[in-house]
Amino acid sequence: MKIGIDCRTILDPERGEAAGVGHYTYNLIENLLRIDTKNKYVLFFDRRVGDAGHFKKRNSEIKFFPFIEYKTFLPIAYSHFLVAAYVTREKLDVFHSPACTVPLAYSKNSVVTIHDMAIYQNKSWFPGQIFSTRIVVPQSVKKAKRVISVSNYTKQDLVKFMQIPEERVTVVYNGVDIKIDERQSAESRKDYLKNKFGIEKKYVLFVGTIQPRKNVMGVIQAFDRLRGTSAYDDFQLVISGKKGWDNDDVFRAIRQFGLTKKVIFTGYIISSDKALLMRNASLFVFPSFYEGFGLSILEAQKVGTPVITSNITSMPEVADDGAILVDPYDTDALSKAMRKALTDQELRNSLIKKGYENVKKFSWEKCARETLGVYEEIVGK
């Protein structure tokens, strides 16, 4: 087979540094190229991408979309017509878009990965995306030979909102690959975190974009309600992630609650720093209102950090019994769960053990093998 994959979401192929879809695409391709030596892969990049040559293997070919200047001045024409024409001329057996959308003008065999349907659940979380939600995503799902969903929950949402038959949707879980440099001593890790981020105590960690859907305000309020307990006095709250939209209330609440010295914002962090923060955290808290998968839950479990996450959408499916599940809309319940997870050593040990077991079910190699199976099913090989 000749398989094409849209790689434009990868920001830095050498280091795999990209949130969400870019991370998925990077790891999927890495593993496909490693496990599949009989098929040919054509990998499509924008010229703005860095070292795309990282993916140049015996079974792959790198292509750069031409006319990149049109992306700025005529984004729709570029993304849906010029890209489609360029991909079509490659005469692929199947073209995979890992980023939810297939060019509107592309009419050959295609696969699209859908990571979540959050925008259809709550449009207020994603302002200004009418063209994508009303036209591009529905058309991509409609014409794709197969739709890959990253969780059973997202599959249910797909069937509900896109009204497509269940048999056209294949669930393929993401993998998890967070890496820790075990050569570092515990003391050197603590010194690094103190010098770089100002972390001076044990800490509770949240990782995610600071935006309404992630419920960062709920984390701050729950932490503030720990006042008067050792779970407050002995810990800091570390929030890692870039600023999204509509987040002024988060920073205003920090000042109003008098938490300026207790809460640390790291901003966007590179993958090695995220791994270190995860590994050294006393607790990972992720009470998001909606996730199509929730990869950070698995990352925390893999490095042996107890997890609290939401009891809704895909998060119970991903966390299984390796996390405390709470209603993200119930701040008191979240605060109580945080206190218990920080002070009950028996509970902590149980969560760590169950987390280690749960994360064994997820790997990027498994993701790649199951994705390859989707390609083969479409082409009939």
Image: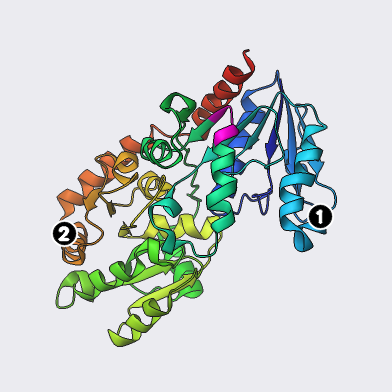
The reply to whether the C-beta atoms of the residues labelled 2 and 1 are less than 8 Å apart is no
Q: List x then y, in percent, for residue 118.
A: 42, 52
Secondary-structure class at tag 2: helix
Q: Which residues are magenta?
A: 142-146
Is any part of residue 243 visible from this angle? Answer: yes
Residue found 19% across the figure and 72% down from its top = 226
**Residue beneath label 1, please?**
68
Amino acid, disc 1: Ile
**Residue beneath label 2, please?**
340
The question of residue 157 being in magenta is answered with: no
Q: List x then y, in percent, for residue 159.
A: 41, 35
Judged by depth in the image, the label closer to the viewer, 2 or 1, is: 1
Is any part of residue 260 visible from this angle? Answer: no
Residue found 38% across the figure and 39% down from its top = 160
Q: List x then y, in percent, for residue 206.
A: 37, 62
Residue found 81% across the figure and 39% down from its top = 86
